[in-house]
Structures are given as structure tokens and as C-alpha cells.
Amino acid sequence: MPENAPESDIETGPEAAERAEARGRGYVLLADLIARGPTEALEAPARASELLAEALDGYPERDEAEADHQHVFGFVVHPFEGAFLDPRGEVGSTRGAALHARYEAFGYRPPAKGEDPEHLATELRALGVLSGAEADAAADGKADIVGHLRELQRGFLDEHVLRWFGALASAARRSGRAWPTALLAQLEDLLALHRGELGGAVEAPPLEGKPLALDDPETDLRGIARFLTTPARAGLFLGKDDLARVGRALELPRGFGSRALMTQNLLRSAVRFGRLGEVTAALGAILAAWEEEIDASPFAAQLAPWRQRGATTKGALEELGAAAARFAEEAEEADEEPPSGERGA
């Protein structure tokens, strides 16, 4: 639908209502699957999707698919908007306030108990509510209301869901787990279809947060680790599986704990063993692959700020790789406490 389309161009009637209703049901089901995984109760409706059925059939037992779901969404990535878009990577701060305002604008009230308002599942349920309302208005032939609801959906998609979904999906895919990969691919298909139907230009706000300042003498490995694990600053969600993969490939210890602590340990080990350039090159390769994904994504316009920020981070990583001597003393320190504010993310 073109932006600000006249009412005469807005389709209503039974077919339009049926499409919107089906879309709403799809969002609710996918929200349940993101929140709960392929449980026994959800397996049958999930199998209505050929993509999800094929993924489930690849597991000897359903509980193995559930384990992969928990690994990715409970350990690797954190499906909360603030974890991706907040300048400190925090849930319940700036992004939470923005979401509450948006929910109020279209009369959606997240359940008092259940997923956090910033959780991807909650955002999908909001899209389900808007789609259901659109279906009712289309069935009643109320083109003005349909148009208004579509404007709300487009704004919510571009300013919230599609600003971070691609980064989450990329990090999850890198974990190589079949069920989560298929689930997010199915959701991407629905989101792309929905956004395509809405039309209109995309205005992508820049990512918040300061880039890495290597020219600051106060910047240490701990600060660099915090930067690299704050997605809005780095332009990438660096997951625990990413860090483990780099550590294994280069035979460097990274320890356990939060992503920031693992990154700090990995950088310290790299400096100590003269392999910092190899680590930064490996991280740069992850960023380069993410850039290629953005270019091929149906949401490339919404994700353009990630590409811009990632390009800046790649340059900083190249500089860091050549600055190992600067961090030699820090790398020898025994103190490996988590950076301030880390809570296992």
C-alpha cells in the first residue's frame, strides 16, 4: 500500500479480512514458539509449516529440538529489544519506555504476567492484535480504519521489530541449530510479506551509543570487551557460540560467564600468546559475513545503521590487532572479574 494512500486504494472485504486474520494467527503462533519452543502442545500447529515440520523431522526426539531452542534463545542470543538497541545493551531502559509508549498508542496492553514487553514474542503478539483489528475493519468495509491500522503496523515494524530482528536472526543462525534457524526463517518470511504489503519508504534511525575510541589512552581490554558485546555500539550481536568458535579455532582460552567476560578473557589470552591480530581478524570476518547478510536481507533498509556501525567497528578491530603491545601489562593481570554491570548476558 503506498504511503498515505487514499481510502479508495485501501482494500477491504472478505478476502482482505481473511489475509489479515491469517497473518494475525501466524504472529500469535510464532510468538508462542519463540517464547516456549516446540513443546508437545505446540508441535502439531508448528507442523502446519513445511519448513518447521522438516526441521522437527531432523531430530530423533522432539526434546532435542527443545534443547536447541533453549540453547539459542536462553544462552546464545537474548530476544529483547533493549539487548540489541539500547546504547548500554540493557533491558528495561530506553527501549522499554519507547515500547510502552508505542503499545499505548495503539491500545495494546501486554499481559501483566508473561513475556517482558521488550521480548520478541510480545512484539509479535502486538502485531497479531493489530492484524486482528485490521481484519475486523476490513470485514466491515471501514477503509479509513484499515488505513490507520496499517500505518501503525508500518511504524511499529520499522521503528521496533525490524530494527533488530535481523541481528538476532544472524546470531542465531551462526549457532547452527536446525530448529531455531527454521523458526526464525519462517518468521522472516511472514515479516517480509507483511512489510511488503504495507509499502512506503523506510527511515532507519541511527544506532545509539559511542563507537570504540582506541585513541583514548584509558581504553583497556575490559572496555573493548564491553564495547564488542554491546550490539548498538558494535553493530553486531556477538554471541557466546561466536566467542567459543573463535577460541577453539585459535586454541585460546575464553573461560565462562557473561559475553563481556568471555570476550575480555579471549582478548587477554590473545595478547599473552601473541595472537591478537588473529582474534581481531576472526571477529572482523564475522562482521563481514553479517554485512553480506544485511545486503541480501529483505530488511536491508531497516538494517542500514547496523552496516554503517559495523564498518566503523571493522576499522577499529584492524587497529586493535596491531596494538597488542599496548595491552601486554593488562593481559598479565590475574583479575578476571566481570565488567561492572554484567549479569551473565
Image (spheres, grey):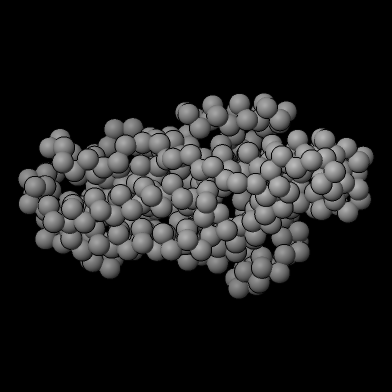
Residue 174 x/y as whole percent: 44, 62
**Residue 68 placed where, x, y %?**
53, 60
Task: Give left or right: position of 58 versus 310.
Answer: right
- In this view, the residue in front, 202 or 174, is 202
98 to 268, vertically: above or below: above
Residue at coordinates 82% horizontally, 35% vertically from top-left? 145
- Give the residue drawn at x 36%, y 36%: 209
Relative image position of residue 231 (x, y in whole percent):
39, 45
In the image, 298 versus 178, the foreground residue is 298
In the image, residue 129 sits, relative to residue 237, either above or below, namely above
- Frontmost residue, 216 versus 44: 216
The count of marks equals: 0
Residue positioned 30% across, 50% down in the render: 313
Say which residue appears at 53% left-offset and 60% top-offset: 297
Query: Quadrant of residue 185 in the image?
Result: bottom right
Image quadrant in which the C terminus is located: top left
Q: Is residue 185 above or below residue 166?
A: below
Camera sees residue 283:
yes
Q: Is residue 148 left or right of residue 185?
A: right
Where's residue 173, x and y in %?
Answer: 49, 62
Question: Visible in this render: residue 36?
Answer: no
